[in-house]
Image: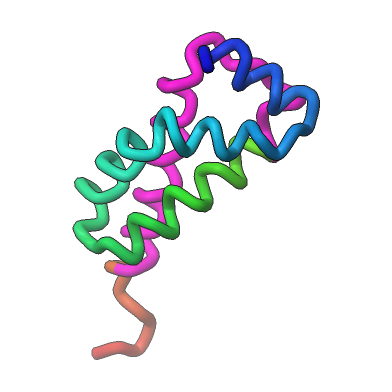
Amino acid sequence: MNDDEIVSLYWDRNEQAIKESELKFGKYCYAIANRILASKEDSDESVNDTWLAAWESIPPHRPAVLVTYLGKLTRRISLNRWRNKTRDKRGGG
C-alpha cells in the first residue's frame, strides 16, 4: 500500500491505517526510538504512542511525506520520554 492510500485511510478514520503504518514504517520508527532511548520497552511504547499521535493529528493535517511525518512524531515522543527519564528530581540530593 502506498503512502497516499495510508493517509486516506487515516483521513477516513479507518483503523486499518494504523496496521498499514506499522507494517510499512514500524521498523523505521522503532530504529529512531531505540537510538534515542536504548531500551526495548521504552522504544516499543514510543512507537505505539506514534501511531496514536498520527491517528489524532492526521485528519486536520495531511502530511505530504508520511515517512518523514511519522519519523518526526517518533523522534519528538522519544525525546520527551528520554527527558522525563533523565530529569533530575527536586530534592533528590
Residue pictured at 66% horizontal, 35% vertical: 16
Name which quarter of the figure residue 75 lies in: top left
Residue pictured at 75% horizontal, 33% vertical: 14
- Please determine whether, in this image, residue 41 is positioned above or below residue 19: below
Q: Position of residue 85 (x, y in %)?
A: 33, 69
Q: Is residue 61 left or right of residue 6?
A: right
Q: Is residue 34 left or right of residue 91?
A: left
Closest to the observer, 60 or 6? 6
| Magenta stretch in the rendered image | 56-85
Residue pictured at 28% horizontal, 67% vertical: 86
- Please determine whether, in this image, residue 93 is positioned above or below residue 14: below
Closest to the observer, 9 or 86? 9
Asked whether residue 63 is drawn in magenta, I would say yes
Q: What main secondary structure does the magenta stretch of the protein show?
A: helix
Asked whether residue 24 is drawn in magenta, I would say no
Q: Position of residue 13 (x, y in %)?
A: 78, 32
